[in-house]
Image (tube, rainbow, N blue to C red):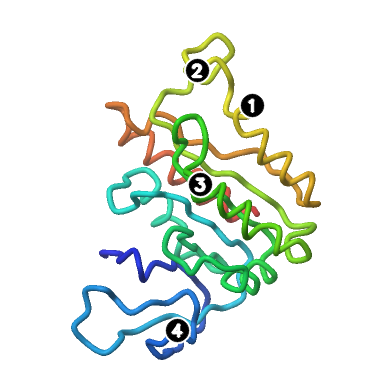
Amino acid sequence: MKINRRNFLGAVGTAALGVDALGANPFSFPDENSTGGGGAVVQQSSSKVVILLAHPNYAQSVANKALVEAVKGLPGVTVIDIYAAPFSVDTYKQPVSEASALVFQFPFHWLSAPSQLKKWCDEIFGGLTDAIKGKKLLVATTTGSEYEAYRSGGRNLFTLDEYLRPYQGLANHSGMVWQTPFVLYGASLPTAPVSIDAGVESYKKRIQTL
């Protein structure tokens, strides 16, 4: 099924209600390819896990798209594309308040996360102080390079755990409960189809345990 980025909210619970095209649901947008007067949208149910997707070019994604497709239909899981959703504290306050865990999902880009996640942490995260305390924080990321590149003495010198320390510090500072990161390695290698298939199954199980 084709996913339109501006109408991207992989959510889901058991209730599906229509809302109008003016944005009664802050996560729903009229389909930009639609010729009609709005289109169907999904009303959010309470979510156990909120996945914040930070991918600057999701339409061209392979690994992250596969991960999203694997988990977006799980009960109690909401996926929000932070490159597409309205950029305000109010957008995130309710789903984050209702969640027991947050996931930062992104491609590992120039040894860090894409810039929108940093902006989100700088400008949105602080406004959710009361909502996030005590919740789990998981980083889920994909790399183009192989596992061995992220070892001491490997091509990239440091492990992913070391590169992701700022997020662990963020969790600690804000009273969240840090989770061991989920990493799908080798998304740009010839062996990527096998790695992605295995990663999808692992990710699905990991999200279900949060």
Q: Amino acid at mark 2?
A: Asn
- The front one of 53 and 84 is 84
The residue where tag 4 is placed is 23
Q: CA distance from mark 1 to mark 4?
A: 41 Å
Looking at the rendered structure, the secondary structure element under dot 1 is helix
Q: Check the image and report above or below for 163 versus 43.
A: above
Q: Is 114 situated left or right of 93 in this image?
A: left
Q: Are marks 1 and 2 in contact (CB under 8 Å)?
A: no
Q: CA distance from mark 3 to mark 2?
A: 24 Å
Q: Position of residue 28 (x, y in %)?
A: 42, 77
Residue 206 percent location from the top left of the image: 58, 48
Q: Nearer the viewer, mark 3 or mark 2?
A: 2
| Element on which disc 2 rests | loop
How many C-alpha atoms fall within 10 Å of the one at disc 3: few (<14), some, or many (≥20)?
A: some
Residue depicted at x 38% and y 77%: 29
Please state the total of marks drawn on the protein image: 4
**What residue would you read off at disc 2?**
156
Q: Which residue corresponds to mark 3?
A: 203
What amino acid is labelled 3 in the image?
Answer: Tyr
Give the mark, 1 or 2, whose residue is nearer the N terminus: 2
Task: Tell me the element at label 3.
Answer: helix
Residue 175: assigned label: none
* Position of residue 151 in the picture relative to residue 126 (left or right): left
Left or right placement of residue 20 versus residue 62 in this view: right
Residue at 21% in and 73% down: 33
Q: Quadrant of the N terminus?
A: bottom left
Where is mark 1, residue-wise?
A: 162
Residue occupying image coordinates x 47% and y 13%:
155
Relative depth, front residue between 92 and 152: 92
Q: Amino acid at mark 4?
A: Gly
